[in-house]
Amino acid sequence: MSSPRPPKFQRRKADRPDEIVAAALEIFAEKGFAAARLEDIAARAGVSKGALYLYFPTKQDIFRAVVEQGVAPNLDIVRAGLAEPTDDFANLLRGLVKALPSVIATTSIGGIVKMVIGESRNFPELAQAWHDKLVQPALSAMTGAIAAAQARGELRAGDPRLYAISLVAPMLVGVIWRETFTPVGAEPIDIASLAEQHVELWLRGVLSQAGAAA
């Protein structure tokens, strides 16, 4: 007769932090930060509450790990793409916009975005972590790529940071709509279609004559 199978947290000790982060991402997206309980996260991860405390002493520590390990890697696709040498910003942007909506659609990132926006007044450290680890690096990468395209003569003159914000804003609205209004019966927004349509509209406004002719 074989011996009983050991509990999950004993079988895969090295995987505990990753499992806790994955569980926390789901719990935060479902319940929000204030309502999320450490025992819920531990149960979802298949570990004891005591084991959870060994890796993450506070709920804030878990959230920071969620941002750094559970969310930030998904945006590395965008940052890596923007860092690629190119002389055709329009096609680079079209390629990136096909990848980003699938990340939004297949992960719990949207729920975390809603949580950060809704709870940042009471928990400003959430907004700080989100800004420092995600928003600022992604915005800086996009701003730099736009500035480089302007220097090549592809895009019209203008504040590259404001151009970057205007580029990503509709996608953020689409995420908020999906998380806030679609669950109560509002007509869903196809984020992939929204992103592709907006990028084409955006390019028409900012491409220079040389960029449009390329």
Image (cartoon, helix red, strand yellow):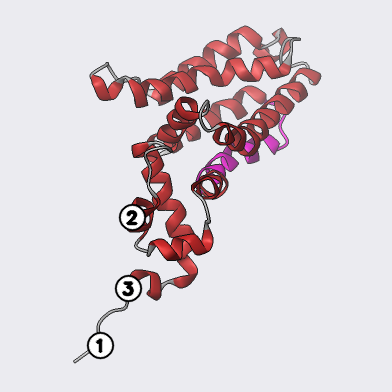
Residue 107 showing in the rendered view: no
Asked whether the beta carbons under mark 3 and mark 2 sit within 8 Å of each other, the answer is no
Residue carrying label 2: 44
Q: With 113 as the anchor, is 134 left or right in this view?
A: right
Residue 8 lies in the magenta-colored region: no
Q: Main secondary structure of the magenta part?
A: helix
Q: Is residue 89 above or below residue 103?
A: above
Task: State how far apart marks 1 and 3 are (Cα).
Answer: 12 Å
Quarter holding the C terminus is top right
Q: Is residue 133 above or below residue 59?
A: above
Seen as rendered, the residue at the extreme left is 1
Q: Regarding mark 2 in the picture, which secondary structure is present there? A: helix
Residue carrying label 1: 3
The amino acid at mark 2 is Arg
Extent of the magenta region? 70-88
Q: Nearer the viewer, residue 103 or 33?
A: 33
Q: With 209 as the anchor, is 39 left or right in this view?
A: left
Residue 73 lies in the magenta-colored region: yes
Q: Regarding mark 3 in the picture, which secondary structure is present there? A: loop
> Would you identify the image quadrant in which residue 43 lies?
bottom left
Q: Is residue 175 above or below residue 54?
A: above
Residue carrying label 3: 7
Seen as rendered, the residue at the extreme bottom is 1
The amino acid at mark 1 is Ser
Residue 200 showing in the rendered view: yes
